[in-house]
Amino acid sequence: MQSHLQNVINQNSVLMNKALRLIVLLLAAAALVSCSFSGKGDDTLVLLKTSMGDMKLRLYNSTPVHRDNFLKLVDMGFYNGVSFHRVISHFMIQAGDPATRTGLTKEQLDTLATYTIPAEFDPQHFHKRGALAAAREGNDVNPEMRSSGTQFYIVQGIQLSDEELNSVEAKINGNIKQALFSRLIFETADSAKRSGAPLQEGQVQELASLKMFDYMSSHPEFRLTDEQRTVYKTIGGVPRLDQTYTVFGEVTEGLEVIDKIASVPTDQSDKPLADVRIIKMKVINR
C-alpha cells in the first residue's frame, strides 16, 4: 500500500512538473486569444468541416478557459487535418490527438500532447446529444479532473429511462467522491512531505477521510434537474460523464454528421478503419 501511495504521488508530481514547464506558454497564448475575443454576450461560433460533412459549434462564454484555449488552437490551424481517432457508436466521437496531425516537430508534439487546463464544471452544461466536451486522463492520475489541452469529443449518446438516470446519478456522485478522495490523499501526503514531517499511509488516509467528511457534510450530492432528465429521455446523451468532464459547447447544426461518423467501422481500439479527418476549423462569429 505504501508503494502504491508513492506511485500515485510520483505520477502526480510528473504531471505537475510538466504543467509548470508549459504555464508560461499557455498564459501567453491565452492572453493573445483573450485580446482577440470581443467579450460580447453572444457565444462564439466555429465551423467544423470534416470529411463526412460539416457541423457548427457554439462555444460557451461561461467556460472561458476552454473557450479561449479551443479558439487558440482553431486560429493557429492545429485542428486542420487531425483525425477522429476514437469513435464509439451510441457514445461519442473524439478528435484532437496531435499524434494524428502531420507536420509537427517532436517538441511541438510533446508540448501539445501533455498540456492540460483546469476543469470548468457548470451545472447548466451537460452531456446531451451534440455536447462538445474536453477529453482527459483518468481520476487515478488526474484527481483534479483537468482537461486535455487539445483533445475533445462530441456526444452522440442514447435515450435513457428515469430508472437508468437514477443509477447514473449514483455513479456520478461516486466518481466525484473518488476523484476528490484521491486528490485529498495526494495533497495531504505532499503537504506533509514538504513540511519535513512525512506521514505514514494510515495517517494520510485518516486526515484525508476527515477532510472528505467535512466536504460531504457541507456539499449536497449531485442531482440532475428536471430539464436535464427530460432532455436525456427525449433527445439522449451520456449523463454519466456530467460534472466529471467539462462540457464547453454544443453542435448547433449538423447533428446528423455525428451519426455518420459514429457509424463507421472501427478496430478493437475504437479507431476508424477508414480515416475520418477534420478538413478545417474556422471561427465564423466571435
Image: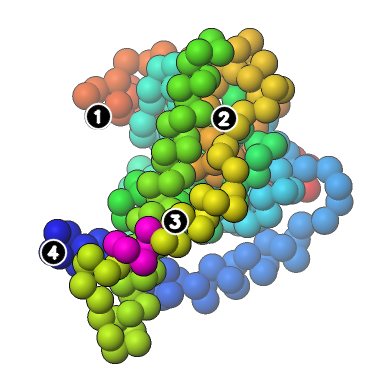
Front: mark 4 or 3: 3
Whole-percent x, y for residue 76 in the image: 57, 55
Answer above or below: position of 72 versus 9: above
Q: Secondary structure at mark 3?
A: helix
What crowding class fits label 4: few (fewer than 14 Cα within 10 Å), some (14-19), or many (20 or more)?
Answer: few
Which residue is at a point 71% across and 22% down the rendered structure image? Answer: 227
Q: Secondary structure at mark 2?
A: loop
Q: Secondary structure at mark 1?
A: loop
Front: mark 1 or 3: 3
- Provide the residue designation for mark 1: 269
Q: Which mark is residue 212?
A: 3
Label 1 vs 3, first from the N-terminus: 3
Q: Quadrant of residue 46?
A: top right
Q: Amino acid at mark 4?
A: Ser
Q: Amino acid at mark 3?
A: Met
Give how far apart the Cα atoms at labels 2 and 1 are: 23 Å
Label 1 vs 4, first from the N-terminus: 4
Give how far apart the Cα atoms at labels 4 and 2 are: 37 Å
Res. 175 in view: yes
Label 2 vs 1, first from the N-terminus: 2
Answer above or below: position of 238 versus 212: above
- Provide the residue designation for mark 2: 127
Stretch of the chain drawn in magenta: 205-209
